[in-house]
Amino acid sequence: MTQTSDYNFAYLDEQTKRMIRRAILKGLAIPGYQVPFASREMPMPYGWGTGGVQVSAAVLRPEDTFKVIDQGADDTTNAVSIRTFFERTAGIETTTTTGDATVIQTRHRIPEEPLSEGQILVYQVPIPEPLRFLEPRESETRKMHSLEEYGLMHVKLYEDISRHGHIATSYAYPVKVEGRYVMDPSPIPKFDNPKLGDMAAIQLFGAGREQRIYALPPYTNAVSLDFEDHPFEASKADHPCGLCGAEDSYLDEVIIDDDGTRMYVCSDTDYCEGRRAAGFVGAMAQAGDGEILTTQRELEITA
Amino acid sequence: MYVAVKGGEAAIENAHAWLAEERRGDKSVAELSVAQIREQLALAVNRVMAEGSLYDPDLAALAIKQARGDLIEAIFLIRAYRTTLPRFGVSEPIDTGAMDCDRRISATFKDLPGGQVLGPTFDYTHRLLDFKLAADGEVPAAPVRDTSPAPVPHVAEFLNDEGLMEEAPHDDTPPPDLTREPLEMPADRALRLQALTRSDEGFTLGLAYSTQRGYARNHAFVGELRIGAVPVEMDIPELGFSVEIGEITVTECETVNQFQGSKTEPPQFTRGYGLVFGQTERKAISMALVDRALRWQELGEDFVGAPAQDAEFVLYHADNIQATGFLEHIKLPHYVDFQSELELVRKLRREAMQNTMQEAAE
């Protein structure tokens, strides 16, 4: 990556970008439909965000400001790697501030701060096919989508309820788009699902290895699958953030000492930092060095 | 005291620096040159060219050096590089009948026009470690004699003349391009062969072996295996004719497979075909066996549910760059998804325990 001047803006050549843009436009025209595209080998491995990277490369303009998050955080290693890739190959501005970004590439999260019109959220997608684990054959699942044959998915969810009392899907929870296509929202926690529908920003989904692109245009209807007597429920750890005290954000669980003491912190690092800068202080941020105010023991099932 | 994890950038840079140091190894040992790898690890270079889909021994050697000898990593480097290359045009199909053969053997005829030429093969070596190589790799020159450049016709043609071989009708349809179009099913034979020629050697070998052991057995004979250089010609529109632009070494394998006949075809021999960049004999034979197994439908055979018959299974899992990427990505952080699983499992356990306690109380 030292001779970056040898590469075109944002790495991909213009013909490839046009091909990807056509797939994106088709995806926007048919929300939730998986558009096959001729994914290229990228200089990072398949499974590490090549779909998202190709979509970002196709939509980025020199004047854009780019943000990359992985698991909600700007500083996780793969987010750093992808951000650096575009800094080098496109020379664009990057940011960690959600509101300042025009294009946000994400893996496994939707930012807590509501996005606005003019922003694009690019998801990295490992398995774009929501029916894949029910039917391994692509030729079959494509048929099922075209016939709108989603009974198998409802049976799976129903079996979960009859076995566990709950739908046992906690991430990559399928949604139905505009009453037509069942879509995989990528492995975001189901906590994020309600943000998918009616979003002001454009949402683009790129699956490089599986060669699929799909999209949700702004203000698109996307409903998490459920049953009348078992309505969808967005869940998260039942704690406030230990650092900023937020009660409305998705939390990561961190083990902080040898006794297995847990702490819960916002997975969206920019959101957490923003709150702390605004003066919000969580219970554990007040504690002295090494001292823990609240402790949460593992699996308090007897409580 | 926990603070949000920072320092990913510095950690990555340091990891890269350490990697570079490890790649070089002990500095008191002379550094490998790219030319040494190209000349002395030629079969590794060939594999990287074949599965990287780029014929350039120097770049393949460089990739092997950079990848510390990890061939899949080297193939990945070549693939990522080849996508950035502009495409000037498409060559004429190579004529393997006009090959300058280094090796040409047939397992189906004892002797035949063009002869049996063993060439540089491991086949009849005794696999004994040669400790002389540890001290001194110099070898005496191999004996040489002049040969007349006689034509070396394809073995399949002899069976063809007798009508014993299935016909392979000439087809001028431009083949699909796996690197420019998304792979979609059903895949025709041209597309399948394209995917197989760059498929992982180990995966293809395993599939081919499974057909020999009875999972869609198709009784393959190596009708012919030939390795050698063929000219590559390209049509230059400004000139109105094609000119030779270079030469590549390829391995071609045609299998002759027993065939009892089916509802649609009379008893005859059928073909499996393998063509791979470089001297890559194990891969070419494997490819031919898998190609033949995948042809069950057009030959009116039964689908017996064997993995090697299943085009979706084979083609979607044969690419080692796709496979290794997705496999290794599970090293990346997944704590957001894992957190939601934790919450779910805790909830389900809590309810299950409560139910058990309640039942015990009653």
Image (tube, coloured by chain):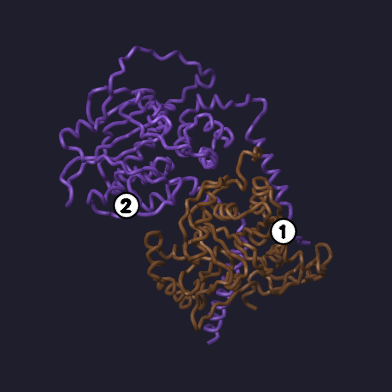
Chain colours: A brown, B purple
* SS type, badge 2: loop
- Residue in front for this viewpoint, A40 or A140: A40
Could you say where residue B213 lies in the image, as x and y percent from the top left?
30, 45
Real-space Cα distance between discs 2 and 1? 51 Å
In the rendered view, does B168 fall on the left or right side of A246?
A: left
The crowding category of the residue bearing disc 2, from other C-alpha atoms within 10 Å (few below 14, some 14 to 19, many at least 20), is some
Please report the residue visible at 68 percent of the width from the left and 39 percent of the height from the top. B18
- Assess disc 1: are there few (<14), some (14-19) or many (≥20) residues with their C-alpha within 10 Å of its C-alpha: some
**Amino acid type of disc 1?**
Thr
Position in image of residue B349 (x %, y %): 56, 74
Mark number displayed over residue B306: 2
Q: Is residue A124 above or below residue B269?
A: below
Quarter holding the N terminus of chain A?
top right
Q: Which residue is mark 1?
A: A96
Q: What chain letter is assigned to the residue under label 1?
A: A
Per the image, label 1 sits on a secondary structure element best described as loop
